[in-house]
Image (spheres, rainbow, N blue to C red):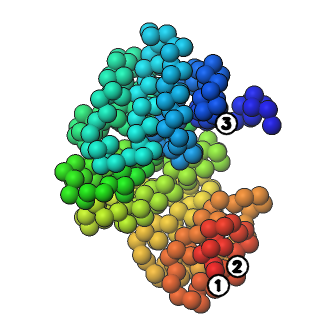
Amino acid sequence: MNEQLILQQVVPELRPLYLSLLAYKSACSGDMSSSAYYLQSARDSPFINPYSLKIHGLTNPVCYEAMLKTLNAFSPMDHWRHALASILILTKEYINMDDKFISNVNETASKEIDSVLHTGIPTYYLYKAFIERSYDYEHKRYLQRYFKEVSPQITVFYQPLYDYANYVLSMAKGVVNLDLPILGAMTTFFTLDVMEILEETIKKLSEHVVFGFIQALDLYFASREMTKIADEVKNIDVFNIEQTEKVKEKAMKSLAEAEKALQKHGQYHLAEALNLQFNYLSGNRKKISEHVRKFTQWIPMQGYDVAYRDYAFYLLKAVDDPIERRAVCSSIKIYDNELKALCT
């Protein structure tokens, strides 16, 4: 399919991410003018961040070097040139991160973003948070400033906050030296400050469910991220037991709040899926057994029913009893590769 036609069909807020992919491919193939054009067209988007770029497969350091060279086509006075340079420099190091990356601020990236923070563009505060390694009140303020500025359009711009959370978790998982001095500050910052902002995000998204199904899906997906985060923290060695429990409590609080909002506005399938995730995190076996019985009667909606799929997924993660597992697997009406793997 023609790339311009694809661009017309991409969800508007994700168009900059697709443009960055085109810029990356162009830079990799040596087409610097096209790369510069795509990067200019993707300006000031929080979706262009180290975590998002890496998980979308943009992982060749040589291509990042080429993209950085394309910035010479931008005016030195263009603030996007400096903001983009900061994030490309950081991402180039992040894709093959080591303990030095985890511990130390990349000074080159930091200088680039510091030179344009005065513009007040929300994305730049988020970029500064990705670069910063202080994990203190000032660090938190960059996340808070981004959240405050995008709150009126939270359904559009919430995902980059979760990208930041997953970025921090990826560093916590990727560290080699478990005695690295910065780890205590990092895990405390995540447990108290990052999770607090994610909780506020769920509250804000809950206010938008009244506007319809798309907004309900935004709330559902953000809430499901809380489940994933709590699940992941449990398996990362650098988080202590108290921190792990605190993250789980905050995630469960958000799930309960989101479930209530979804129920109130008639989004019962989505609410039920979050109720299961709440009980999955709490380890309430009695409630989980009740969910098994409900699932065997559940008829999925036409098309791809995300609530149904996630319901099956978290049931299979929660259920140990062989009879209950067979009951779930034999009742599944929509399979994907993950569900197939859990049922084999």
Q: Left of 55 or right of it: where is 110? A: left
Kind of residue indicated by mark 3 = Val
Q: Quadrant of the N terminus?
A: top right
Note whether 35 is above or below 156 in the view shown. Answer: above
> To which residue does mark 3 refer?
11
Asked if marks 3 and 2 touch (Cβ < 8 Å), the reply is: no
Q: Is residue 48 visible?
A: no
Count residues near mark 2 (Cα–Cα under 10 Å), then give few for <14, some for 14-19, many for 20+: some
For label 2, the SS is: helix
Please state the horizontal and vertical placement of residue 227, each as a whole percent of the image: 46, 60
What residue occupies the far right of the structure in this picture?
A: 1
Kind of residue indicated by mark 2 = Ser
Q: How many marks?
A: 3
Please state the horizontal and vertical placement of residue 68, each as a whole percent of the image: 49, 25
For label 3, the SS is: loop
Label 1, label 2: how far apart the Cα atoms are: 6 Å
Asked if marks 1 and 2 touch (Cβ < 8 Å), the reply is: yes
Q: Left of 142 or right of it: where is 254? A: right
Q: Choose top left, top right, bottom left or bottom right for residue 316.
A: bottom right
Which labelled disc corresponds to residue 327?
1
Kind of residue indicated by mark 1 = Ala
Among the two numbered marks 3 and 2 on one chain, the one whose residue lies closer to the N terminus: 3
Note whether 107 is above or below 283 in the view shown. Answer: above
Q: In this view of the protein, which residue sits in the foreground, 176 or 52?
A: 176
Asked if marks 1 and 3 touch (Cβ < 8 Å), the reply is: no
> To which residue does mark 2 refer?
331
Label 3, label 2: how far apart the Cα atoms are: 34 Å
**Residue at point 65%, 59% (across, down):** 306
Please state the horizontal and vertical placement of residue 125, each as a whole percent of the image: 38, 29
Note whether 8 is above or below 70 in the view shown. Answer: below
Count residues near mark 1 (Cα–Cα under 10 Å), then give few for <14, some for 14-19, many for 20+: some
Note whether 161 is above or below 26 in the view shown. Answer: below
